Amino acid sequence: MSEQLLDFGENWTAQAQAVDPAVVNSAATDSIPRPAPRFKPIDRSQYEYRVFCLEELIEAEHPARAIWEFLDGVDTSPFEEGILALQGRAGQATLQPRLLIALWLLACVDGVGSARELSRRCEHHPAYRWLCGDEAINYHTLSDFRVQRREALEGLFVEVLAALSHEGLIRLRRVTQDGTRIHTAASAASFHRQASMEKCLSEARQQVQALGDPEQQPGRVEAAQKRVQQERAQRLQLARQELQKIRDSKKTEEDKQQARVSTSEPEARIMKMPEKHFAPAYNAQLVTDADSGVIVDAELSQNGSDFVQLTPALEQVKHNFGRLPDQVLVDEGYMSRENIMEWDGRTDLLGPYDQQGKDTAEQRRRNGIAEEFAATVFRFDPNSNSFVCPQGCCLQAAGKNIGVGKIEHHYRADAAACAACSSKPQCCPKTAARTVTRIEEDEAVVRLRQKMATAPVKATYKLRARVAEFSNLWLKEKMDLRRFHVRGLQKARAELLWHVIAYNIQQWIRLRWRPMLAELIG
């Protein structure tokens, strides 16, 4: 049977070759070389004259149109103060503040932080050409506008919040506060101790004296060099003052001697970053509305600790909106007895707090106490006001300390009893007798801890990470605000405000403008 099938296949192949000319001529065709592909030529030297409309450069739903439309309803008159080009008077007209605001907001949305790059985009990028009417803008103008008029910029931030509140996007029903460290423009190599900084300051002063009076310099280059050296000397003088502040904040003499300051950005501070390393940074604090994701307050601090930032931020929210949020969700970095007591009854503050447990664990680790002899396993007898250890030894009251929001009651065992105990190497290896501390906390702290243990509050607190971390991540990942492009605390705060305003307008675009546009178009 298989031989018959094989013969049938060979006969069928022979017949097909006899009928199909392509198969018959395949051998001849393979010997002919294949022509090269033909492509369209690219001629970049040719001149073209085109007619186009600026309105057609970008699509109807482009964010540039939304930003321009949003600014139409915001008061930008504070940016007009000091403009000398007036109607009916001679002189060249100046650029609209609304245009410069829109350019920087769009630049923040696109992750552009360089004024030079923004100037180039005004010449080549369709969206920026559409905004500025296809007119070039000098990068000096853009750079100065970003950091000048600090009060006008803060007013713009409040104006944007007012507009979003009018749209119903801000209700302050629940907010979150979280901090994020943002790298400074200064590098770690610019930090010096006092001796090397004084040497740099002395050299800068000598260079200034050698260059003479800048007003009497023969050329512009020499005068510019003189001004640069004067600015460097002033910056080093400021660095000396900042170094003294840092030294005053240190507790030990060794830490004071090791204090360092940046000679290029004296206000920068070395902070612990999320990646567990230390780097020059500022601490950015963001308060975010949980319902809409709008940032209702943004602050910048030199302090790497978070718990001291809670009160200023919430007070600023109250100043902007006339009232405090109904509920505030924070992480454990903001929780302290002082904050809990201060905000008890003023707002519903939610956050984990177990300072007593942390202190007890740290004390046990320092003293080399085994886990099975931790203070939590000691039994307290309120009738006799004493503790009983796992081996049955009694610890009597040995005094108390009164602090802010707490009373520390100290208990101590008998030294002879501890010396005779077989568990002393595990219970109190570094001390003659075992001691235990009982903390009597303020009622506000007790109420918070009890409240945080309930199931509804635990479910509510789970929203914190999603709301708080989202705004931080958006600023860093989408807007590329990982490092400031300007130097100094006030200028860096201005750059942070530009990004926060742009972020808030993006939330308006997402929640209001695009749905409205889709309804009009479709």
Image (cartoon, grey):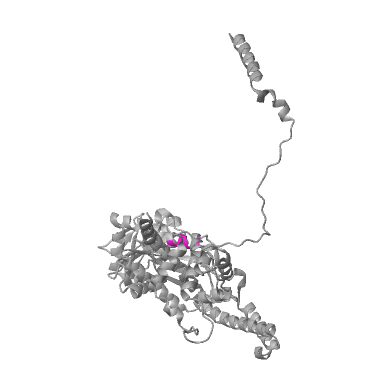
The x, y position of residue 187, in whole percent, is 59, 69
Q: Is residue 35 left or right of residue 308?
A: right
Q: Can residue 481 be seen in this view?
A: no
- Name the residue nearer the viewer: 263 or 382: 263
Is 67 in front, or is 502? 67
Magenta stretch holds residue 475? yes
Figure disc tally: 0
- Quadrant of image for the N terminus: top right
Q: Residue at x 47, y 59 (%)?
A: 59
Residue 246, position in %: x, y?
Answer: 52, 77
Residue 378: name its quadrant.
Answer: bottom left
Q: In the figure, residue 317 lies in which quadrant?
A: bottom left
In the rendered image, is residue 71 in sight? yes
Quadrant where the C terminus is found in the figure: bottom left
Image coordinates for residue 78, horizontal then vertical, percent:
43, 79
- Residue at position x 41%, y 72% from top? 157
Can residue 349 be found in the magenta stretch? no
Q: Which of 335 and 69 is in front in this view?
A: 69
Main SS of the magenta part reads helix
Q: Position of residue 193 (x, y in %)?
A: 60, 76
Residue visible at 34% across and 75% down? Answer: 319
Q: Which residue lies furthest to the left in this view?
A: 383
Is residue 482 found left or right of 216 in the rendered image?
left
Q: Nearer the viewer, residue 421 or 145?
A: 145
The magenta span reads: 471-476
